Each structure stands twice: as C-alpha cells, then as structure tokens.
Amino acid sequence: MKILFIGTGLMGAPMAQKLLESGQDVTVYNRDIKKAEALKSFGAKIEESLKTAFSGIDIIVFMVSDYNAIRSLLDCINKKDLMGKTVIQMSTISPKENIMLENELNGIGCNFMEAPVLGSISQIQQKTLIVLVGSSAPLFELHKDLFTSFSNRIDHVGGVGKASALKLGLNQLIIGLTSVFTMSLGFIRENNIDINLFMDIVRQSALYAPTFDKKLNNYLERDFSNPNFPLKHLLKDLNLIEAAFSEKNINTETLKGIRIILQESVNSGMGDLDYSALYNTVHKNPSET
C-alpha cells in the first residue's frame, strides 16, 4: 500500500521515518517543506502540493497540531481525491472532532480511523509507542500491522471517538502529575531538603510515577530545550480535556489553576520549550544555587 503522511513535525517525522525503514512506500507532505526534506535520505517522496498528492495513494495519515490544521488541509483537497481511500487521523483532537471527520469522510466514500498515540520521540525510535485505535473492527484488522513500524502495543478501543477519549484521559494524567510534582519539588528545594532523600522516599511509596524521574534533570538544571512535547501543545490538550470532560459531567475545577500556570508559561515565551518548563512558572525566584 502507498501512504501519504501529512505532518512531519516532532512526532510525524520520526514516525514517517520508521514507516520507511520498515519498507513502506511513503510520500510526505508538510506545509513547511524544509521539515520534510530530511526524510528523502530514507526513501521518502516529497510532495509540494496537496493538489497532486493523492494519485495512487491508498492511505492518508494526519499527524498535525490540532483540528484546525486538519480542517485547513482538508479544505485544500478535492474531496473526490479521497474516494476509496483510508484516512488515519493520529493527531490529538477531541472525540467530537474525530466523529465529525468520520461522518464527513464516510459521506464521500472515504474510510476513517482515529489512532492517537501515547509516548514521544524516544518511544517511536524504540518502537514502543502505544497506539490507540478507534474504528470499525474490520478496518482495524486491515490496517493494524501498519502501526508495528513504531509500536509494540496497538489497542482497538472501539468505534471512532473512543480512542480519542482514552487519549484525553491519559493526557490529563500528564498534566496533573507534572503540575503537582513541580509544586512539591519547588517546595522541597526552597526548604533546603536533600533532593535525593525526597526522591528516594517518593520512589519507594505509592506516590511514585516514572514521569517524575523522566523530567527530574530538566527541573534541577532548568533546561527545557530539545522538547519531546512542547508546552503550548499541553495547553491545547488541556483545553480539549476541559471541554470533553465537562460534556460528560466531570468536574474540571482542578484544571483551572493549571490552566493559569500553562497560559502564563506560554505568555512568558516558553510555549516551544518542553512542557516540563511549567516548573519555571510554578517555582519562580528560586533560592537554590
């Protein structure tokens, strides 16, 4: 099968690379073509225009920033070019948005799957990305092997909307765990308590989450460069989470304070840094040396 991979950013580029390394026939498109050019060395064909991108293509993968980006791309496409093809939508958007896309594309004779992922660049490279699929069972069976290029866990969650709901539930944990840990870490440091003692106790307790250690050096060094997930995207996900949770009558009051922290971080110019940079907003004017 021939794949058109749309979106070669932080996640999209290594995912497309893994597809190429596994022997897939991949054409890539990115609005900033410079971000796609490195994939030429792995055998990718670079498409400069969506108007000519779909000839001979079987599968179109979207891995872009948000629903508005998907919408703007679809609006540039002659919908007849999608007839008989399958769209695999891997960006993090809301269940409602994925369902709208499914209805729209099914209406023109195009199959649709949602397949958001959990993990980041290192998981792609290690082929341990977790792929959450929302689709019909037959469509899942037809295309599930495609994901093995970068994943060793592929879960069929249910119909379209189910996988994106699960993804938002998981991302809410990222937001919550990161924000509450940075508060405690800042407090411990301001009280001149040994960080190693603090972490040893946390690791041996029921309070521990591996993400604490994953980002610990970022916090201690205050180095948030080389992001694997930019802070501005975490804020975008928080907005999706708050809306989707509220629709299901889940109280989201606890997210309001985190929203203030994330928005302040973005407003301070940290939007393109790793999401752990929210620590700089949580723990300002530090006394540590």
Image (cartoon, helix red, strand yellow):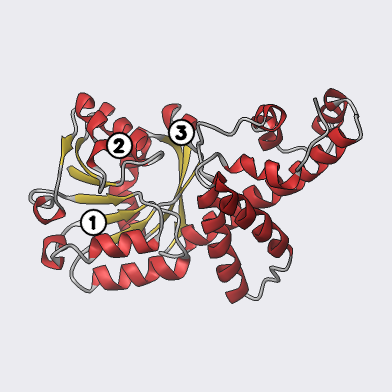
- The residue positioned 74% from the left and 63% from the top of the image is 254
The residue that label 3 is drawn on is: 121
- Distance Cα–Cα, label 1 vs label 3: 25 Å
Where is residue 166 shown, x and y percent of the image? 54, 57
The residue that label 1 is drawn on is: 86
Front-most of residues 201 and 286:
286
1 or 3: tag closer to the N-terminus: 1
- The residue positioned 22% from the left and 66% from the top of the image is 75
Q: Is residue 240 visible?
A: yes
Q: Is residue 141 left or right of residue 129?
A: left
Where is residue 42 shown, x and y percent of the image? 23, 26
At numbered mark 2, what does the secondary structure look like: helix, strand or loop?
Answer: helix
Front-most of residues 80 and 154:
80
The residue that label 2 is drawn on is: 16
Of the residues shown, which amino acid type is indicated by label 2?
Ala
Front-most of residues 113 and 141:
113
- The residue positioned 16% from the left and 38% from the top of the image is 46
Of the residues shown, which amino acid type is indicated by label 1?
Thr
